[in-house]
Image (cartoon, coloured by chain):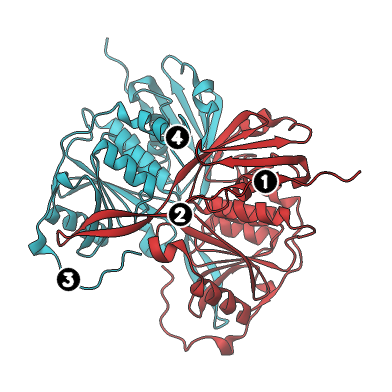
Chain colours: A cyan, B red
Amino acid sequence: MTQRPLRMTHASAPLTEVVEVINEAGERCACVIPCERALTVFVDKQELVTLMTLGVRPEWLVLGYLLNQGLVGGVQEIASITVDWDCGAAAITTRAGLVGLQEKIARRVVTSGCGQGSMLGDLLQCVGARELPGTGLTQEQVYSVVNTIRLQDSVYKTAGSVHGCALFEGRELLLFIEDVGRHNAVDSIAGWMSLQAGMTGANKIFYTTGRLTSEMVIKAAWMGVAVVISRSGITQMGQQLAQRIGMCAIGRATHRRFLCFSGAQRLHLQPDLAPVSRLRSVA
Amino acid sequence: MTQRPLRMTHASAPLTEVVEVINEAGERCACVIPCERALTVFVDKQELVTLMTLGVRPEWLVLGYLLNQGLVGGVQEIASITVDWDCGAAAITTRAGLVGLQEKIARRVVTSGCGQGSMLGDLLQCVGARELPGTGLTQEQVYSVVNTIRLQDSVYKTAGSVHGCALFEGRELLLFIEDVGRHNAVDSIAGWMSLQAGMTGANKIFYTTGRLTSEMVIKAAWMGVAVVISRSGITQMGQQLAQRIGMCAIGRATHRRFLCFSGAQRLHLQPDLAPVSRLRSVA
């Protein structure tokens, strides 16, 4: 018997707002700021969590959150996702109920998307089970990704104060999502991926404007993506995790410069494409 | 009877690490990155949460976390805080046990430090109970704060990828704390404040390199601080909350420019100090 498809709303809301501000010259002027709204997630009528979000595609966000927290094993377990901005609620109904939901959410890791434990070993356990695909990329592809993001229309360009994440396949931008928190943007991408029949992390590149903390590396690994590129830097735990699981982690990627922090074997360097060397700042 | 003072370790750990990276020219070079470590918090031997932190002053962080989450009412409720980096654990013992701990942590708000609810009204409830002091400041003070931060030694200057928060009284820098997450840095300041006998948020200015999201506004209000300054921007909910509670929220504060998003009545403008006007970017 074929399973009924997942039913899902497509809730929309303004992403920016114009407010009056006073600048240093004492002038009143208009300023565009990003929206931030609370979305309380209910699974089978049980309140789970409240996410603070920009609200671009809340259904993908909620789905990706459940997947990246390991609360659901796959999209096939979900019957419907209904988001209503009037009451700031996302109602998820599962097909067969979630087993052990309370136990799974009992342990909290703040700023890590992995609710499993406290130490590097535990974090590794979360991602170690998933073997990463053999994705590689060329230096030219790194430049192509960075340039595509540069040209992308975005809330950031008009309002600032949001992070962007994107998924690429080769040079092709599959999805670009912004949110007030990096973790929301990456969760939304995970949610979207799970809705594309047969899509895996193979041959994908994950891009983020935010830092590559342990949380971001874990979430990328959780999505099965072996290459991550960031405009920003990396933390020690992010770098250690990436190294242990063989993920290619490229940071400080702006213009034609970057640093490969981990997994250089996946990167085909083309130094001829590099700009003329100069004193670099890595700050 | 005088209560015995709070016993506290002073755990220290390296804040940066040098790793080998490969740059776009194919050169192997050294790069300084910030540390990130897991700290699992146990209250009276019960596991509460794991915080991912740079690790500057973990005892202040844990104390501030408990205060800002409303899990303890004051520092007088705590008998000791012991941080051991070898096992990545912070052990807190309370004087009389925490009442209703499970209920208090049952509802989660992701990226908001306020675990009370989901909607703006609920968020307001969290902060509305505390009336903000009558703190004001001059434009010259804004410039002084920004300049002091600019001159401050920091992990950010050597390794990037961290956020800084600071507490000022007038022009005087009382405390500067960096962490991998903004919320940790502000929690550490709250913890430190609670240890200074008789200190309140009156006449204090809170500075952050990060964005003024709802979480940051709520945490500042929770500390009783009426003036916040950010190098970055503000979100809609951050701005709305600040306006409702009469907090002066100044963002985009770099060099001699800034935008006052809320509470301009607290700011004594001195437009003569402003740089010569030019086309501004608010992105």
Amino acid type, mark 1 = Met
Subunit bearing disc 2: B
Mark identifier at residue B8:
1
The residue depicted at 42 percent of the width and 29 percent of the height is A81
Q: CA distance from mark 2 to mark 3?
A: 29 Å
State left or right for residue A6 relative to residue B182: left
Q: Earlier in the sequence, mark 1 or mark 2?
A: 1
Assess disc 2: are there few (<14), some (14-19) or many (≥20) residues with their C-alpha within 10 Å of its C-alpha.
Answer: some
Question: Residue B155 lies in what quarter of the image?
Answer: bottom left
Q: Front-most of B229 and A171?
A: B229
The residue positioned 56% from the left and 24% from the top of the image is A46
Residue designated by label 3: A277
Give yes or no for contact between labels 2 and 4 (Cβ–Cβ under 8 Å). Answer: no
Determine whether B14 is above or below A272 in the image. Answer: above
Percent x, y of residue A43: 50, 25
Relative depth, front residue between A259 and B261? A259
Where is residue B265? Give x, y as percent: 69, 73
The residue furthest right is B1
Q: Say whether mark 4 and mark 2 are on the same chain.
A: no
Q: What residue would you read off at disc 4?
A: A119
Mark-to-mark CA distance, 3 and 4: 40 Å
Q: Amino acid at mark 3?
A: Ser
Residue sitting at x 66%, y 55%: B192
Q: Secondary structure at mark 2?
A: loop
Q: Are marks 4 and 1 in contact (CB under 8 Å)?
A: no
Q: Position of residue A104 (x, y in %)?
A: 49, 24
Label 3 CA crowd tier, 10 Å (few <14, some 14–19, many 20+): few
Task: Say which element carries label 1.
Answer: strand
Q: Which mark is residue B15?
A: 2
**Quadrant the N terminus of chain A occupies:** top left
Q: Quadrant of residue B264?
A: bottom right
Q: Earlier in the sequence, mark 3 or mark 4?
A: 4
